[in-house]
């Protein structure tokens, strides 16, 4: 499966990505390169309040700082539009 094209198609949407180690990365796809997909994680389950962010950084309303997941390690991608955050 071509995860690059799939990630490009879902850019800006909330997804759950599973990597080779079984770790799940949940958040919004911020951007996609040929080697990485950048995920902006949700920092809390509040509806629009300020969060602490990823690793202690504040990044807007309830979203953390984007981080990269290597596309070579992606084993699954699930659209998270039906998830209640």
Image (spheres, rainbow, N blue to C red):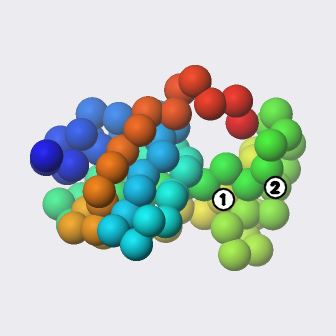
Q: Relative to residue 50, is residue 41 drawn left or right? A: left
* Mark 1 neighbour density, 10 Å: few (under 14) some (14–19) many (20 or more): many
Q: Are marks 2 and 1 in contact (CB under 8 Å)?
A: yes
Q: Relative to residue 28, is residue 53 drawn left or right? A: right
Residue 7 picture quarter:
top left
Q: Relative to residue 70, is residue 58 drawn left or right? A: right
Residue 71 picture quarter:
bottom left
Q: Which mark is residue 22?
A: none
Residue drawn at x 70%, y 30% is 84
Q: Is residue 54 above or below residue 77?
A: below
Q: Of all residues shown, which one is farthest toward the top?
A: 82
Q: Is residue 71 above or below residue 81?
A: below
C-alpha span from label 2 to label 1: 7 Å
| In the foreground, 77 or 53 | 77
| In the foreground, 80 or 75 | 75
Q: Of all residues shown, which one is farthest toward the front?
A: 22
> Considering the numbered disc 1 on the image, is that residue within a helix, a strand or a loop?
loop
* Mark 2 neighbour density, 10 Å: few (under 14) some (14–19) many (20 or more): many
- Dot 2 or dot 1: first in sequence order is 2
Residue matched to label 2:
51
**In this orientation, does residue 28 appear?**
yes
- How many dots with numbers? 2
Residue matched to label 1:
64
Q: Relative to residue 31, is residue 66 drawn left or right? A: right
**What percent of the width, then of the height, locates residue 19?**
37, 64
């Amino acid at each position: 499966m071509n995860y690059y094209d799939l990630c490009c198609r879902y850019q800006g949407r909330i997804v759950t990505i599973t990597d080779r180690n079984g770790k799940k990365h949940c958040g919004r796809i911020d951007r996609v390169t040929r080697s990485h997909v950048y995920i902006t994680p949700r920092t809390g389950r509040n509806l629009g309040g300020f969060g602490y962010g990823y690793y202690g950084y504040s990044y807007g309303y309830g979203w953390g700082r984007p981080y990269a997941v290597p596309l070579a390690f992606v084993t699954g991608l699930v659209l998270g539009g039906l998830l209640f955050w």
